Amino acid sequence: MTEKTVLIAGASGVVGHAALEHFHALPDWRVVAVSRRSPALPAGFRGVHLPVDLTDAADCARAAQAMPPVTHLAYAALHEKPGLVRGWREADQMQTNLAMLRNLVESLLAAGHRLQHVSLLQGTKAYGVHLHPVAVPAREEGPRDPHENFYWLQEDYLRARAAEAGFAITIFRPQLVFGDALGVAMNLVPIIGVHAALCADAGEPFAYPGGPSNILEATDARLLARALAWAAQAPTARGEIFNVTNGDVFVWRNLWPEIADSLGVRTGPDRPLSLARHLPTQAARWDRLVQAHGLAAPPLAQLLGESHHYADFCFGFHAREAPPPVIVSTIKIRQAGFADCIDTGRMFRDWFTRLREQRILPTIEAAAMASPPGPRSAAGG
């Protein structure tokens, strides 16, 4: 059997880290990981990690020369600006994301790597969810939404280069992605967990902090990693675009009691709160909580990344009325042969359990939430 080597770009991110762990567990794959930050490597990791700045063409060329022969690329790297949401429509951010992909692919081809397949991540911004209501369900077969987006720049480049170099591509459009990566642009699991721990520490209820309800879908990063491994070899995935979700739908406000239960905290009446503004003010209290519980968590700023801004967007904190539902069809990927799924409530329990096991989040005793708020109960907005 020909040896298969997957290069995971963005290995410290929420999708890249899940892909790193999944491919590492597959006996017939060799793994090469690249990222600027060092990822948490799986126990007994047999692959290679190289620190690489994808915005630097020379750095990519150096790394490509040092890699074992790469046959597959799972591209999960992403450039976001501080504050997150505003940058989604800015041209320089789009060009940076294009340059990162191009620098890596061109370096691999120039170094003689024989790529067979490349997986590229997009998302529901492809349908314009950040700009306007979208069709329910949103389907992959429709025309491109007419707005500027780095997705289109990357896709057009990759399709043209694949036709020239002879490798296949698959594009994935997950919904909200959840995992255990810390300090990244868009991962709400540590944000929710930290907020719950701070509420418990202050003796306050873990109230839903968002605005009007919306109907959404989630994508477990582990499920997406399995889809990446499937697409790497499935003939039915070649040249295709696939939506990917857990398989159910949810409303944050309805799911909040189950999230609270999985974290060991009590809920209370809704309390709209900008986590983007509030959480950075809690750095000293987080440091004290980390010390008191003997946690291995980093300082709060390193843990948050830009995901506290993402929380305000996803929870609809700034919305004045209920936004339209965001539902995508996953019929196409199921008919192509990938039918994996997971209950979204179960997903949250899994990830919170894992962060407790890693000593990133404290184990909160029910008694800690039993007393009324004390003098430490001040919370910013």
Image (cartoon, helix red, strand yellow):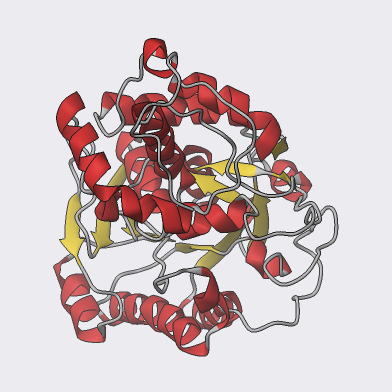
Which of 157 and 152 lies nearest the eye of the viewer? 152
What residue lies at 68% left-to-right and 44% top-to-bottom?
Answer: 217
Q: Nearer the viewer, residue 315 or 341?
A: 315
How many circles with numbers are drawn on the protein? 0
Evaluate whether residue 301 shows in this view.
yes
Does any portion of residue 234 appear in the rendered image? no
Q: Is residue 357 above or below residue 229?
A: above
Residue visible at 59% across and 58% down in the picture:
313
Q: Quadrant of residue 24?
A: top left
Q: Is residue 41 left or right of residue 305?
A: left
Residue at 71 percent of width and 64 percent of height: 129
Residue 297 x, y percent position in the rendering? 22, 39
Give the percent coordinates (x, y) of residue 345: 59, 27
Q: Is residue 176 left or right of residue 65?
A: right
* Residue 63 in which image quadrant: bottom left
Placement of 318 over or under 373, stated as above or below: below
| Quadrant in the picture for residue 296 | top left
Q: Position of residue 302 (x, y in %)?
A: 26, 54
Q: As drawn, is 45 to the left or to the right of 214? A: left
Compared with residue 180, is residue 143 higher up or lower down, i.e. above or below? below
Residue nearest the viewer, comparing 158 with 193: 193
The answer to which of 330 and 14 lies nearer the viewer is 14
| Above or below: residue 170 compared with residue 329 | below
Residue ranking furthest to the front? 375
Residue at 46% of width from left, 29% of height from top?
204
Residue 326's x, y, as percent? 75, 53
The quadrant of the image that shows the N terminus is top left
The residue positioned farthest toward the right in the image shown: 136
